[in-house]
Image (cartoon, rainbow, N blue to C red):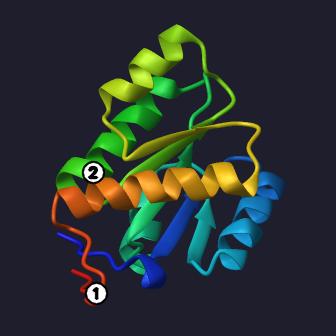
Amino acid sequence: MVVVRQAACKILIIESQLIIAADISLQLLKMGYEVVGICTPSDDTMKTIRSCRPDLVLMNIKMYGIDRKINMARTFMQDLGLPVIFISAHTNQEVLLQVMSAQPYAFVPKPFAARDLERGLKTAFDRLKSERLWMPAYHESG
């Protein structure tokens, strides 16, 4: 289980469009977060997680392969205790029902401004705090 202190949060971005991932990375850096990696959703994602040891995953969800990505996120959350925030341009009812069934720590619809991303992160930290996994003066990876 990972106990997260907001100020020291290490974030892994999973996004298939690298230019978008780079923009998100810059926004997160400006907010004071550490971006430990950017990767595309693939079979190597677990290897990236093991090597980067993020505290939180920011994951884009597209219509193509949505079931696989949601299952991947469930694995991160259930097996690794790793919080996931979904981002997506697809916000129709069907997609939202699928996405929310995975119980992500937050959902940020695209396109978004920095304040929207910041709200999503705050929502995730509030949930971590309520689950007693977020502690303001303590950070432990493991």
Q: Which mark is residue 77?
A: 2
User: Marks 2 and 1, Cα distance to the nearest angstrom?
Assistant: 18 Å
The answer to whether 127 appears left or right of 119 in the picture is: left
Residue receiving disc 1? 139
Q: Amino acid at mark 2?
A: Met
Above or below, 113 relative to 50: above
Neighbor class of circle 2 (other Cα within 10 Å; few <14, some 14-19, many 20+) is many
Q: Amino acid at mark 1?
A: His
Quarter holding the N terminus? bottom left
Residue name at image x 37 percent, y 61 percent? 125
Q: Position of residue 14 (x, y in %)?
A: 57, 54
Quarter holding the C terminus? bottom left
Q: Position of residue 55 (x, y in %)?
A: 38, 71
The answer to whether 86 appears left or right of 51 in the picture is: right
Residue name at image x 27 percent, y 51 percent? 77
Q: Quadrant of residue 3?
A: bottom left
